[in-house]
Amino acid sequence: MNKSTYVVSPAERQARIDLAACYRLVAHFGMSDLIYNHITARVPDSAEELILINPYGLMYNEVTASNLITINLDGEVIYNPNPDFGINQAGYVIHSAVHRARENVSCVIHTHTRAGMAVSAMECGLLPITQTSMRFYGIPYHDYESVAIDLDEQSRLVADLGDQTAMILRNHGLLAVGPSTAQAFNTLYWLEMACKAQVDALSSGVKLTMPPDEVIQKTHHLYQPHVRRPFGEMEWPAMLRIVEKLDPTYKN
């Protein structure tokens, strides 16, 4: 579909702004991987299942609301406002699988951060040694199957994710999903912080303490959205203020 025939609804426009902000935040907090990896958001109120994805070749701090590309869940480009850039065909495999399997998921974030990759390679996985990591107690894992380009991996990936909002991809990186961009970003941020704390603690070489299992489970329970609140929504306006101060052109 060409630029002149694609109409961006007000709802999609807002989704684009939030997604562009998320890209800028991931870059700001040091969680990007040059031009690689993706954050995708479902196009709201669309007759066809469509998602927004970054142009392949742009740094995360170059993504704007208007240069995001619209694709369907088969990876076909529906709307590309910048023909100088396409999409990373390999990149949509993980994202389209989650969007197709989880209708309640609006945003999917996948990263290759230093701490995330480090924990993904640890046999012990993510340890409940901090309050932050206890939020992710029982986090699922997906075993590494090489670069995610094979479509038959999708069924195994979504089966491992189940109904969870975060997963560690073994020897690979981190995955966070949510019913909104705000919630997905919050999940990713705190999962990354938990991984950083674990790498720091293990690198110290000292003996670590582990809280009793009942305390770990109680803490995990208190982090559930039905117990307190959906984490991310209250924080999102503050996150947008950060992006606004960094570079307000993300909304363009």
Image (cartoon, rainbow, N blue to C red):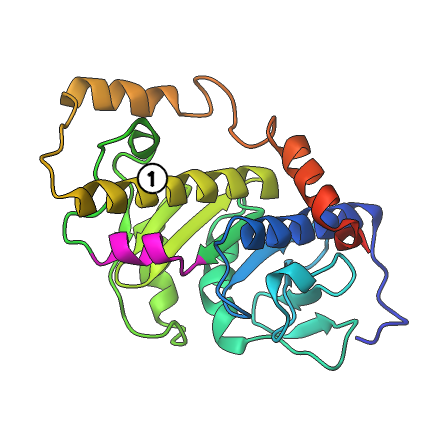
Question: What residue is shown at x 42% (from left), y 38% (from top)?
Answer: 190
From the viewer's side, name the closer residue of 196 and 96. 196
Q: Quadrant of the C terminus?
A: bottom right
The one of 11 and 220 positioned closer to us in this rendering: 220
Residue type highlighted by circle 1: Ala
Q: Quadrant of residue 144?
A: bottom left
Q: Which residue is mark 1?
A: 194
- Residue 30's place in the image compared with 2, above or below, is above
Residue 105 appears in the rendering: yes
Residue 125 rendering spot, x and y as whole percentages? 21, 48
Is residue 57 shown left or right of residue 30?
right
- Any part of residue 45 in sight: no
In magenta, the rendered stretch is 111-121
Left or right of 52, for residue 67? right
Decide if residue 115 is on the left or right side of residue 90.
Answer: left
Q: Is residue 120 magenta?
A: yes
